[in-house]
Image (spheres, grey):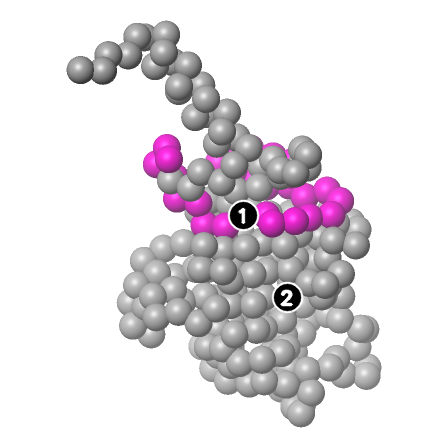
Amino acid sequence: MFMMSTRGFFTILIFVFSFCQWHYCGNVFGEEKLAVINKFKGDVIIQHEGENQLVEQRGARIRNSSIYNQDSISTMEASTAELVFNDSSRFDINEKTTLTIISEKTTKFNRSLLRRVSLKAGGLLAEVIPSKTVLTEFEIPTGVATVRGTVITINLGVDLLCVVDGEIIFTDIYGNEQTVITGECISIGAGEVGYSGGGSAEQPTDRPASPFVPRDNIDK
């Protein structure tokens, strides 16, 4: 029978902790990893269990890149991040953006898991992979956007929500529902939730250009 000394056991334990610090270890110690920062630019901070952790590039690896339930992500000025989830859904996060990722059980739309993204400031380009088990919702100050398609753009900086491809249902804080499909945008600013025109997902001419960062340019 194989016998391990106490010294050998602690050596292996230290190795595992070191490995998890630099790699994607998922649920090794009881926490379920929901996503990882795949790449970033500038200053990006992860708040985990009340502690702020600076995302850092160490050689080919990214330190503090794992995202767990109820973690918050903040990008500073001139900073961006690409977030990749376990189901391959992907967020391109703009500068000056703060969001929190929450995972919880649900029965809504016959799904078993709700991925709730609380977007408090800034904006992002979200590509959500259709799933029979995971429902994705974006919670913003004026309501909730429930994803029914694949790609959506949410820009709080210009109080606008645009659907690049797919379909969402936006429910405002009064319970009013509005379906938004490919090429359409709606205003989501306080006191002005409403349809902003269809046919193209471009920004209306009386608003600033969209601040979202296309994925091809996120690491430049």
N-term mark: 1 or 2: 1
Point out residue 173 in the picture as x, y percentages from the top left corner. Answer: 50, 71
How many numbered discs?
Answer: 2
Q: Nearer the viewer, residue 220 or 47?
A: 220
Check disc 2 and report the residue beneath it: 125
219, above or below 212, in the image: above
Residue occupying the point 59% across, 85% down: 182
15, above or below 41, in the image: above
In the image, what residue type sits under mark 2? Leu
107, above or below 207, in the image: above
Q: Nearer the viewer, residue 14 or 42?
A: 14
Question: In the rendered image, which quarter contains the N terminus?
Answer: top left
Point out residue 103 in the picture as x, y percentages from the top left corner. Answer: 40, 54
In the image, what residue type sits under mark 1? Val
- Residue 148: say if magenta: no
Is residue 193 among what the camera can see?
no
In the figure, is residue 107 to the left or right of 67?
left
Magenta span covers which residues? Answer: 28-55
Residue occupying the point 22% across, 15% down: 2
Q: Main secondary structure of the magenta part?
A: strand
Check disc 1 and report the residue beneath it: 36
